[in-house]
Amino acid sequence: PEWFSRFGWLAPLLVYLAHSLLYAGWIVDDAAISFAYARNAAAGHGLVAYPGTAPVEGFSNPLWTLLLVPFYAARMFHFYVTPKLIGFVLVAATFRSLSGLLARFAPRPAVATFLGLMLLGLNTPFVVWTASGLENPLYAFLVVYLCGAIAATLSAAEGAAPPRRYLWLGLCAGLLALVRPDAVLFAFALPAIMVLLRLRGQPMRWRRLGPYVLGAGASFGAYFAFRLAYYRDVAPNTFYAKSGEAHYVMRVFDGTALMQVVDLLRATGGWLAVALLALAALYLIRRYWSGTPSAPAALSAFVFLGIALAIFGLLPKDWM
């Protein structure tokens, strides 16, 4: 029914809410870092860990940290309630965006939305971390929103959407890069998708990448300029603390990155999960080569899936 197609994501959202209430009294300790910086900024001490200390960027999620500042300034921040409410709103927006994205390429979008989101609402790691007080719900929303927005833009008359649309996509990509440092890889999704669509024979308006780069530079570049001026560094302190153990390039060549992704999939459902992901990837590739109006959406989902798995494989192991 039409109502199920439009509102089928609400039932999984209620399941997510009920699941998240099991962790109502839990906040991961790392979230307190963002809370402290946001509180001190709202109190006029600057974006610092402790009042009166020298500025050190001890967080790696600037957009999430800045999002919390107005709640402290308005005296509306509760240690448990506020980040979880913000997270729930962002998860609701993520579910809604996912339903819209699936509607573009899934053969039965209502069923795919209901089943897919229901599994997501029942997935304990997703629920735990989006209710943890950290940036995960904001990360999830911006990744899904950007993927859907790119799909919608490139589905419209061979990507002939107005330049302001590409400017908006760039702004979103830049903001996403400010949620987590590794999210900067998603900024390369649009150019990659455009190249792959062109290889399949679809005309592309390459000049539209100009506004996209401008938008990404405006959002990400504004904070980068602030970082240089305020913290007098090009990267957060957390980067130097963890980069010594990363060896990102070597993880690709020695197979560590691939095995880490395989281990993730096996942890979710054994080798069946690996097989299901492979089938999903083949389905998206088939949609891409079909030449139908659903091709840009399927390709967007495929590229974003690939980037997400690549990020997971490249990052060093972490209990979180």
Image (tube, rainbow, N blue to C red):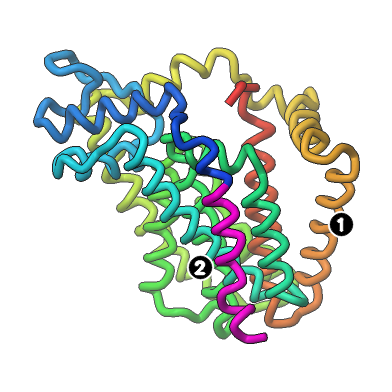
Q: What residue is shown at x 73% (from left), y 71% (from top)?
A: 111
The quarter of the image holding the C terminus is: top right
Disc on res. 149:
2
Relative side of 203 to 165, left or right = right
Residue span colored magenta: 1-18
The quarter of the image holding the N terminus is: bottom right
Amino acid bearing label 2: Ala
Q: What residue is shown at x 37% (from left), y 48% (from top)?
A: 86
N-term mark: 2 or 1: 2
**Are dots 2 and 1 in contact, CB under 8 Å?**
no
Where is residue 241? Give x, y as percent: 46, 14
User: Magenta span has 179?
Assistant: no
Disc on res. 18:
none
Q: What residue is shown at x 25% (from left), y 27% (from top)?
A: 37
**Where is mark 1, residue-wise?**
279
Where is residue 5? Give x, y as percent: 63, 79
Q: What residue is shown at x 58% (from left), y 45% (from top)?
A: 19
